[in-house]
Image (cartoon, rainbow, N blue to C red):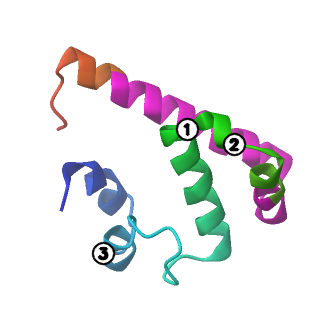
Amino acid sequence: MSVRYAGARHAGLSEAKVAALDDLHSDVFTPRERAALRFAELMAVDHHKVDDATFGELRRHFTEVEVVELGVAAALNLGLGRLTAILGVEPA
């Protein structure tokens, strides 16, 4: 398993969910989890595709405050990941 999943396993994510992270439509995730994963994936791959439909889906599962928290968490993790990559920092 890739090192990028080590934090997920450490935080208590089941092996089944870790294994399914490459399939955002997997039934192992709740609809709430799938919405968050799709949002994070869009943030990482093409943030210009985060649109009203994306926010509509998020709002069906999260409060406004939680949507902001998801966005901040995604932005921080993406930024830190990119910074460590360009600095050549190896994951612990």
Query: Where residue 5 sits: x, y (%)?
Result: 29, 55
- Name which residue type carries label 3: Glu
Q: Quadrant of residue 63?
A: bottom right
Taking the image as shown, residue 29 lies to the left or right of residue 48, namely left
Q: Which residue is drawn at 74% across and 52% down?
A: 54
Query: Where residue 72 sits: x, y (%)?
Result: 62, 34
Which residues are the magenta region? 57-82
Query: Where residue 52 sits: x, y (%)?
Result: 83, 47
Q: Quadrant of residue 68?
A: top right
Image quarter of the C terminus: top left
Q: Residue 50 carries which label?
A: 2
Taking the image as shown, residue 90 lies to the left or right of residue 50, namely left
Q: Residue 15 carries which label?
A: 3
Q: Distance between the residues labelled 2 and 3?
A: 29 Å
Q: Name the residue under label 1.
A: 46
Considering the numbered disc 2 on the image, is that residue within a helix, a strand or a loop? loop
Q: Residue at x 15, y 31 (%)?
A: 90
